[in-house]
Image: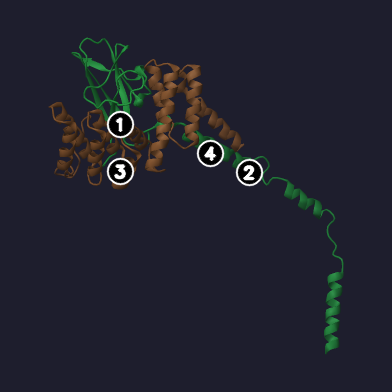
Amino acid sequence: MILVALLLATQVVVQDPRLERLDPETRSSVVAIVDSARGMRLPSEPLVQRALEGATKGAGAPRIVAAVRRLATDLGTVRTALGEGASTPELEAAVAALRAGASTHVLTNLRTARRGPLTMALSVLADLVASGVPADSAAAAVLALAPNARDADLVDFRRAVERDISLGAPPGASAAVRALNTGVRDATATADGQPPPRPPRRP
Amino acid sequence: MFEHDDDIVERMIRQLRRPVSLDPGLAARVMGEIAAPAHPGKKRTWPWLAAAAAAVLGAVVIAHPWTRGSTTSTDAFQFVLMAPQAASVSLVGDFNDWDPARAPMQTAHGVWATVVPLAPGRYRYAFLVNGVEWRADPAAPNAIDDEFGTPSSVVTVAGRGS
């Protein structure tokens, strides 16, 4: 009876209603990739989202399937680099960093250098490259900041570099200089010790 | 003295060898008790049903990954796009299954805005203007791995206290 129940539950997975937005051909290929990834204990949600993104953007079946398959492969690669305990957000951010040009060696070093979640550090690395910072420079800067900087410090660092670039600074040089100047700030708190109310944040 | 002890042993052996008379229906009653459920139709069934229900519940919970962030704290994020000529703008991304119907934006004098609660993680998103035109968020980093020929942006939400 337990076996039957598990089989029924598996059927529920296959029938993820969100994937009904895909055409039948695309859906069957995506479901196969998702099932395979799940069998390797990789997160399936990023794969589903990538397929839905393709469907909403009107991409054809080959393009959607290729994107999902590539993402599954990259998730496996970064999971090997970060370890079995890596969270889904960490894996997604690591894929972005990998595609930005960071090596798996950098990912592993980052895991060693930083305690706690790596999501923000990896995202900042990827975002710096997207802003024009060479991948090696971005990796070196983030690795230098990783041991002590808070996530908020990393975001401030990224914004400072983006601002420098928009003002005409060389991206690599800006990242190097800003990394030297980024420190840990005191936690913001009001006089009564309570954190201030937070307005909606911006990306 | 030894003869006396021998008598005692001999009597014990005789007693032990004497056949014991049992109720002829005893064996049948014992076997009947063993075969019958303690509480017919109840105790034997419930453990299996409970185990099956737990298996289904556990498997379904594991199998529904789209509950990302539902058990973690969220931060409110405001998304803004200047589009004075637009008739409609939707915010679509990993946080709403890329479904334009789920996040229509409100406008005031051409400034389109909406607030979305986001759990910690990295999300890809884009604005869909007038239902046909894709735009990246000018205030956010671009997604570097756009594979569908349209621009996207990314937002990363840190965990609380990190």
Q: Residue at x 39, y 15 (%)?
A: A58
Chain B drawn in what color? green
Residue at mark 4 to residue at mark 2: CA–CA distance: 17 Å
4 vs 2, front mark: 4
Quarter occupied by the C terminus of chain A: top left
Say whether mark 1 and mark 4 are on the same chain: no
Q: Under tag 1, what secondary structure?
A: helix
Q: What's the chain of the residue with tag 3?
A: A
Residue B162 at x, y percent in the picture: 26, 42
4 vs 1, front mark: 1
* Quadrant of the rendered image containing residue B21: bottom right
Residue at the far bottom in the pictured view: B1
Q: What's the chain of the residue with tag 1?
A: A
Q: Mark 1 packing: few (<14 Cα in 10 Å), some, or many (20+)? A: many
Residue on which disc 4 sits? B54
Residue on which disc 2 sits? B43
Q: CB of mark 4 within 8 Å of CB of mark 3?
A: no
Tell me if residue B105 comes above or below residue A198 in the rendering: above
Residue B16 at x, y percent in the picture: 83, 71
Q: CB of mark 3 within 8 Å of CB of mark 1?
A: no
Q: Earlier in the sequence, mark 3 or mark 1?
A: 1
Q: Under tag 2, what secondary structure?
A: loop
Chain shown brown: that is: A
Residue on which disc 3 sits? A110
Q: Amino acid at mark 1?
A: Ala
Residue at mark 3 to residue at mark 1: CA–CA distance: 15 Å
Say whether mark 3 and mark 2 are on the same chain: no
Q: Is residue A203 visible?
A: no
